[in-house]
Amino acid sequence: MIKLNKMTDYGAVLLSVMAGCYRREPMRHFSAAELARKSGLTPATTQKLLKHLARCDFVAAERGKMGGYRLTRAPHAISVAEIVETLEGPIALTACVTTSTDPCASRRNCCIGGNWEKINSTIADALDKVSLEDLCHPENVFQQEMK
């Protein structure tokens, strides 16, 4: 099974909450408590993810009465591949692919490694073509594909 870890999923959820208001209020700041409440995540998980997302420049953190967290880029400019790679590491389906951090021990003798590379690239490219905005409004993605 190909599965993202929970923190990657939760990070995408937090970003989507912020993206939902971006069109109306691009500079809107959210408190961590508000994001936890709107996302259904625990405050501790929300804080942990926001710190990581801030270090990786997805969100900006500002202190003070009018502070909080806001997206640093428009949702259409953030790809799902970026989110996954930031929170999970390189997209690597198997140890055979060049993006794997744990190289395969039988790489020299394997006859299917190059095939996994093609599959891995196809999945990474597909994730790169879907933006955070698309993730929030999947009907737009399907309408574009139908044209």
Image (spheres, rainbow, N blue to C red):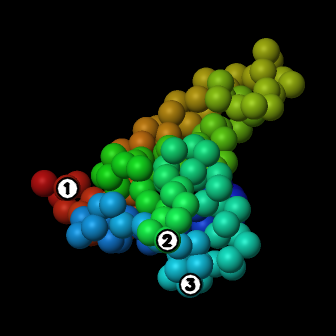
Is 61 displayed left or right of 29 in the figure?
A: right
Give the structural element (helix, strand or loop) at label 2: loop
The picture quadrant where one finds residue 147 is bottom left
How many labels sit on residues? 3
Return the disc, 3 or 2, that comes first in the chain's sequence: 3
State the residue in front, 5 or 68: 68
Say few, some or many: other residues with alpha carbon within 10 Å of mark 3 (under 14 / 14 to 19 / 20 or more). few
Say few, some or many: other residues with alpha carbon within 10 Å of mark 2 (under 14 / 14 to 19 / 20 or more). few
* Label 2 with label 1: CB-CB less than 8 Å: no
* Label 3 with label 1: CB-CB less than 8 Å: no
In the rendered image, the vertical position of residue 103 relative to residue 122, given as above or below: above
Q: Amino acid at mark 3?
A: Arg
Say few, some or many: other residues with alpha carbon within 10 Å of mark 1 (under 14 / 14 to 19 / 20 or more). few
- Spot the residue most to the front: 65
Is 122 displayed left or right of 63 in the figure?
A: left
Q: Amino acid at mark 2?
A: Lys
Residue 126 visible here: no
Return the disc, 2 or 1, that comes first in the chain's sequence: 2
Residue 30 visible here: yes
Report which residue position mark 2 lands on: 65
